[in-house]
Amino acid sequence: MPSKILAIPFLLIVSIAGYYSWKVDDSYVFFILPFFFILALIYILAPQIDWWWYERYPPDVDKPVRKMLEKVNPFYNRLTPQDQTRFRQRLAMFVMGVNFIPKGWDIIPEDVKFAIAANAIQLNFHQADLLFEEYENVVVYPTAFPSPQYPKHLHSSEVFKEDGVLLFSAQEVMHGAIKPRQYYNVALHEYVKVFMDKFPAPSLPIFTEEDWSALGKVSHLQEINIRQILNVPDIDPTIVAATLYHSFPEGFKKTFPEQALQLGTIFGSRRVTSAT
């Protein structure tokens, strides 16, 4: 981390001054104090210092994450090489900038963090802002979970707007990440809500309960499959439609050509270059 590198010379000065105050003259202690103050400032401002540096010199993801993207992420693979680099850099910074909170286990695996973050990056890829500032806390359970909002439902994902928190089941997140053609993407589903909360205009094309049958033609996923995976009572078909648009773009454009154009304008996906 840049903040740690910045702290090294001050740590050396403090160490040397401490040695001299012990071995030579204890008046060197007064020489240490201002450097302790500087080190304290670096420690307090470390997140801001690191973020400032990485905004100017973006990091890349590690090789395993890059391989995962190449293997399973259709959106990433449709990008130009230049935009793929930008996607990875934004992905690395997003994981740094979000507060991932484990719930029901001690540590969230790194692949789960990147699998969640990839969906946010896909949605805001054409936006100047990298983070969703009002939703920087992400709680991750190992499996389906109850919550104060849905105490009687073991569900896979949720946005709790009042606290600006997203909640996910790692199991379902990884299903959607590793086999995106077979499983409904719960992380993408929730980040669509977050995206539209931040960018409410223009609004999404409206889908109603009557559209479930037509939505079933976009992919092999039917209403019953999606309801079983999400397992909450208030599923909005409009959010499902926007999620399917990103997960199954070819099927969605074929079934809903007019709405696909609207969604392309909202999410800026018409700038994405198709793979050849």
Image (cartoon, rainbow, N blue to C red):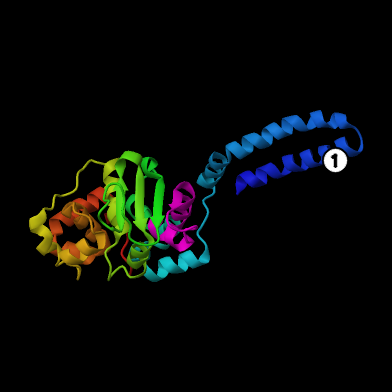
Question: Left or right: 9 with respect to 159?
Answer: right
Question: Left or right: 219 with respect to 119?
Answer: left
Q: Quadrant of residue 251?
A: bottom left
Name the residue beneath numbered marker 1.
19
Magenta span contains residue 109: yes
Q: Is residue 244 above or below residue 238?
A: below
| Residue 125 seen in the figure | no
Picture residue at 18% right of the left edge, 56% below the top: 260
Picture residue at 45% right of the left edge, 47% below the top: 99
Picture residue at 38% right of the left edge, 61% below the top: 170
Q: Nearer the viewer, residue 221 or 55?
A: 221
The three-letter amino acid code for the residue at tag 1 is: Tyr
Q: Which residues are magenta?
A: 88-117
Name the image quarter holding the C terminus.
Answer: bottom left
Dominant SS type (magenta): helix
Task: Specify the farthest residue to the right.
Answer: 24
Picture residue at 77% right of the left edge, 43% below the top: 12
Q: Is residue 261 above or below residue 220?
A: above
Q: Quadrant of residue 274?
A: bottom left
Say what secondary structure mark 1 lies in: helix
Q: Is residue 201 above or below residue 109?
A: above
Q: Quadrant of residue 188?
A: bottom left
Q: Nearer the viewer, residue 142 or 46?
A: 142
Question: Left or right: 62 with respect to 168?
Answer: right
